[in-house]
Amino acid sequence: MQHDVRLIAPADAAPLADLLVRNRAWLAPWDPARPDSYFTEGGQRAEIDGCLRRRGRGEMLPLVITTDDVVVGRLNVNSIVRGAFESGTLGYWVAEESAGHGAATTAVGLAARMAFDGLGLHRLEAGTLPHNARSQRVLEKSGFERYGYAPRYLRIAGDWQDHVLFQRLAD
């Protein structure tokens, strides 16, 4: 299996909508609550358009995760801040059938290289729910180090939830 990442494109709307519908229950415990429209092709088209506009302003890097050229997840470098900080926040997910097969770990490693070498960032941050051991393993395998704990950090699955914080600095 060949895992990779690439820039998201408008043509990804339908495959992403299908993937999200099939994985809605799998992703629900780890994601913000989303309206039903998010899980449609039109909702994904709007999401992609917004992401590409933010990319054009230098605010994010929106990617899809692929296995053998088939979309199996998403990865974003969000909240890019320049100047003295040169930092971004990493977020990602993979479909249930792709979990545990190296897609997320490969994608995080590739995205880190893109962020450091391509975008010139100094630091990437990522947060996980305290009980999300799989995601923590992905980050650790990808060179991220745990550096903190943030109470009630993000609203996930409708509730403000604590997060374990990780960072990776440019080599």
Image (tube, rainbow, N blue to C red):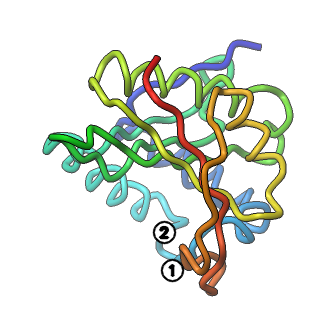
Vertically, is 135 above or below 86?
below
Vertically, is 52 above or below 21?
above
Q: Give the quadrant of residue 100.
A: top right
**Label 1: element kind:** loop
Position of residue 34 measured from the top left corner of the image (x, y, whole percent): 53, 76
Which residue in the protein does label 1 denote?
35
> Do the residues bearing badges 1 and 2 touch, measured as CB atoms within 8 Å?
yes
Which residue in the protein does label 2 denote?
38
CA gap between label 1 and label 2 equals 6 Å
Residue count near mark 2 (Cα–Cα under 10 Å), binned few <14, some 14–19, many ≥20: some
Q: Give the quadrant of residue 3.
A: top right
Is 102 or 132 nearer to us in this picture? 132
Position of residue 170 measured from the top left corner of the image (x, y, whole percent): 43, 23
Is 40 or 122 nearer to us in this picture? 122
Q: Residue at x 67, y 59 (%)?
A: 164
Residue 146, label in figure: none
Vertically, is 143 above or below 90?
above
Name the amino acid type tagged 2.
Answer: Tyr
Q: How many marks?
A: 2
Name the amino acid type tagged 1.
Answer: Pro
Vertically, is 17 above or below 142?
below
Residue count near mark 1 (Cα–Cα under 10 Å), binned few <14, some 14–19, many ≥20: few
Q: Residue at x 73, y 46 (%)?
A: 95
Position of residue 140 measured from the top left corner of the image (x, y, whole percent): 72, 34
| In this picture, residue 58 sits left or right of residue 7 | left
**Label 2: element kind:** helix
Is 144 or 2 nearer to us in this picture? 144
